[in-house]
Image: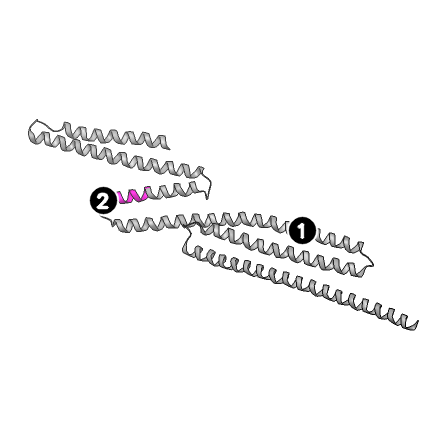
């Protein structure tokens, strides 16, 4: 296509030169008027050649951009830059034409500024989707790791419970430890998930080309993720305090039971001595 364009361009230039050559050759005489007319025609010839060259270079640049666009990765920064370059080339052509037609250049610029913003916002949306996909893949790995950790914990609990068969006190201690370990694991997972959500949303919001609608959406999601993290951390703190309190209460009960047992033994001993 470019080769055909180049050939056509050379033919058009030749036609322009030939047209003005004929006009200049038709002028007879070498007077001041005739020479002024020859100069005028020569200047017109150069102007038409320049306009022809500009049209050709503009069209050539347009085709080169289209070819490059066809070869770049869709959704890439390179694609955006090429589309913006294409847009600015079209803007320049319309502004050039406005010099002749008298069209309002402010309206032209407003139109292209809007198109530029739309291109950049569309690119920002695609970038946000890519970030979300990346974090979703990472979250899937974390989900599987959490499930595996819980299963390992359950298997260990079953083995320890079986080994303590017949010892109710030991089984109760194993059960309590399992519940606490599982709770800590779930608390850590909930907090880590919230932190990852915050990191993802903050990364997305760094893109200054986000549309106002998308920015609001992600800012609201970020506020919720931060709230979720605060809730998870508070719940974990409360649960830890409750675990410690429960452990202290059990220890106190055990100490009281032991003390009561020793008092009973001492009383039994005294009764035996008195009977003697």
- Residue at figure coordinates x 28%, y 37% from the top left: 55
Q: Which mark is residue 149?
A: 1
Is 211 rendered above or below residue 21?
below
Which structural element holds mark 2? helix
Mark 1 closeness class: few <14, some 14–19, many ≥20 residues within 10 Å: some
The answer to if 100 sits in the magenta stretch is: no
Q: Residue 130 appears at what percent x and percent y?
A: 50, 47
Q: Is residue 179 above or below residue 98?
A: below
Residue 3 lies left or right of residue 156; in this view the side is: left
48 relative position to 261: left or right = left
Q: Position of residue 203 (x, y in %)?
A: 48, 50
Measure the alpha-carbon separation of dots 2 and 1: 72 Å
Question: Could you tell whether 41 is left or right of 182 in the image?
Answer: left
Name the residue tied to disc 2. Answer: 99
Q: Residue furthest left?
A: 31
Q: What numbered label is drawn on residue 221?
A: none
Q: Which of the 4 image quarters holds residue 189?
A: bottom right
Q: Residue at x 19, y 32 (%)?
A: 45
Few, some or many residues within 10 Å of mark 2 (<14, 14–19, 20+) = few
Check the picture and name the quadrant holding the C terminus: bottom right
Of 225 and 106, the residue lying toward us: 225
- Percent position of residue 174, x then y: 75, 57
Q: Is residue 92 rendered magenta in the image?
A: yes
Quadrant in the picture for residue 32 = top left
Mark 1: secondary structure: helix
- Indicate which disc, 2 or 1, sits on the residue closer to the N terminus: 2
What range is drawn magenta here?
89-97
């Amino acid at each position: 296509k470019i080769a055909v364009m180049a050939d056509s361009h050379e033919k058009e230039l030749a036609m322009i030169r030939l047209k003005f050559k004929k006009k200049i050759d038709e002028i007879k005489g070498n007077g001041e008027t005739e020479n002024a007319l020859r100069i005028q025609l020569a200047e017109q010839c150069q102007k038409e050649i320049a306009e022809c060259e500009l049209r050709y270079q503009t069209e050539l640049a347009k085709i080169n951009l289209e070819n490059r666009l066809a070869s770049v990765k869709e959704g890439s920064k390179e694609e955006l830059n090429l589309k913006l370059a294409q847009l600015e080339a079209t803007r320049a052509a319309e502004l050039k034409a406005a010099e002749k037609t008298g069209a309002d250049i402010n309206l032209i610029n407003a139109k292209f500024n809007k198109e530029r913003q739309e291109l950049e916002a569309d690119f920002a949306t695609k970038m946000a989707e890519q970030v979300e996909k990346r974090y979703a893949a990472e979250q899937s790995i974390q989900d599987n790791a959490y499930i595996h950790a819980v299963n390992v914990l359950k298997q260990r609990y079953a083995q320890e419970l079986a080994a303590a068969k017949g010892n109710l006190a030991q089984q109760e201690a194993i059960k309590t430890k399992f519940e606490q370990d599982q709770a800590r694991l779930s608390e850590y997972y909930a907090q880590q998930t919230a932190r990852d959500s915050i990191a993802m949303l903050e990364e997305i919001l760094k893109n200054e080309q986000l549309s106002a609608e998308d920015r609001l959406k992600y800012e609201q999601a970020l506020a919720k993720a931060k709230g979720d993290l605060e809730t998870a951390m508070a719940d974990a703190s409360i649960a830890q305090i409750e675990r410690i309190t429960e452990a202290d209460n059990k220890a106190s009960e055990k100490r009281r039971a032991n003390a009561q047992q020793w008092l009973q033994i001492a009383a039994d001993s005294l009764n035996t001595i008195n009977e003697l």
